[in-house]
Image: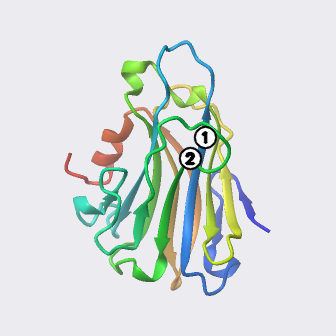
């Protein structure tokens, strides 16, 4: 049975699924009906950071235009431009054994493309979540559903995988920001 997390909650993936090798991180959301006159396009991005909370290189910023990390361990499976329908809207697959030993954390963010121009924010988005699935057998290990009103935010740090005691843990972060993707890139040291 999957662990249901609240903001700030943590789970040891190694304890929940001993021998875990390959995971799928699914991110989902549903845009509400709005009067902004523009379709919502949310984008998942992944930052592979070292002990200093900065990406190891710009190539360690994984998103739809840079779909694979340098070590081949993290693969972004594509950009969903509408968020319509049930299930995961964007997916990241991770081979935990291939992750570079210099990577201490893998941070998962979602931003609204052209949020300022389209007058859009996460208060206009519902049913947002991040979930971790064991690719061997497809069992859901953990899920975090955002339940706050992010009416001023255009970017959300959903969660992060991090190393601890020789294994991998997941933390539900749920931190909102209003600087979009550029703000995350500055925060994690991506040269944009």
Q: Position of residue 122 (x, y in %)?
A: 55, 31
Left-right relation of 71 to 141: left
Which of these two is toward me, 75 or 2? 75
Foreground mark, 2 or 1, reads 2
Q: Is residue 40 above or below residue 162?
A: above
Colouring mode (rainbow / by chain / secondary structure / one colour) = rainbow
> Which residue lies at the image location 23% right of the left edge and 58% below the top edge?
58
Q: Residue at x 46, y 32 (%)?
A: 154
Q: Residue furthest right?
A: 1
Q: Earlier in the sequence, mark 2 or mark 1?
A: 1
Compared with 161, 46 (above or below) is above
Q: Position of residue 177 (x, y in %)?
A: 45, 37
Does 104 sit left or right of 1 as displayed?
Answer: left
User: Which element type, helix, strand or loop, lies under badge 2?
Assistant: loop
Query: What label does residue 29 carry, if any?
Result: 1
Q: Where's the N terminus, which quadrant?
A: bottom right
The number of discs equals 2
Residue occupied by mark 2: 89
Relative horizontal placement of residue 69, taking residue 153 as reference (left or right): left
Q: Residues within 10 Å of mark 1 (few under 14, many from 20)?
A: many
Packing grade of label 2 (10 A; few <14, some 14-19, many >=20) is: many
> Residue 28 location, x and y as percent?
60, 46
Residue 192's image quarter?
A: top left
Residue at horizontal 43 percent and vertical 67 percent from the top:
105
Question: Which type of secondary structure does the marked residue at label 1 adopt?
Answer: strand
* In contact (CB < 8 Å): disc 2 and disc 1: yes
């Amino acid at each position: 049975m999957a662990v249901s997390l609240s903001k700030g909650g943590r789970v040891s993936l190694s304890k929940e699924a001993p021998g875990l090798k390959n995971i799928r991180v699914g991110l989902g959301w549903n845009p509400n009906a709005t009067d902004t006159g523009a379709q919502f396009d949310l984008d998942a991005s992944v930052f592979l950071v070292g002990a200093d909370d900065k990406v190891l290189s710009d190539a360690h910023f994984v998103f739809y235009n840079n779909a694979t990390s340098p070590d081949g361990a993290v693969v972004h499976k594509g950009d969903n431009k509408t968020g319509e329908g049930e299930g995961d809207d964007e997916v990241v697959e991770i081979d935990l054994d291939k992750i570079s030993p210099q990577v201490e954390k893998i941070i998962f963010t979602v931003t609204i493309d052209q949020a300022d121009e389209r007058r859009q924010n996460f208060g206009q988005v519902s049913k947002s979540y991040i979930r971790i699935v064991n690719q061997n057998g497809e069992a859901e290990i953990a899920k975090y559903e955002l339940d706050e009103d992010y009416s001023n935010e255009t970017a959300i740090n959903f969660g992060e995988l991090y190393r601890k005691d020789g294994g991998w843990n997941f933390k539900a972060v749920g931190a909102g920001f209003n600087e979009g993707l550029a703000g995350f890139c500055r925060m994690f040291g991506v040269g944009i």
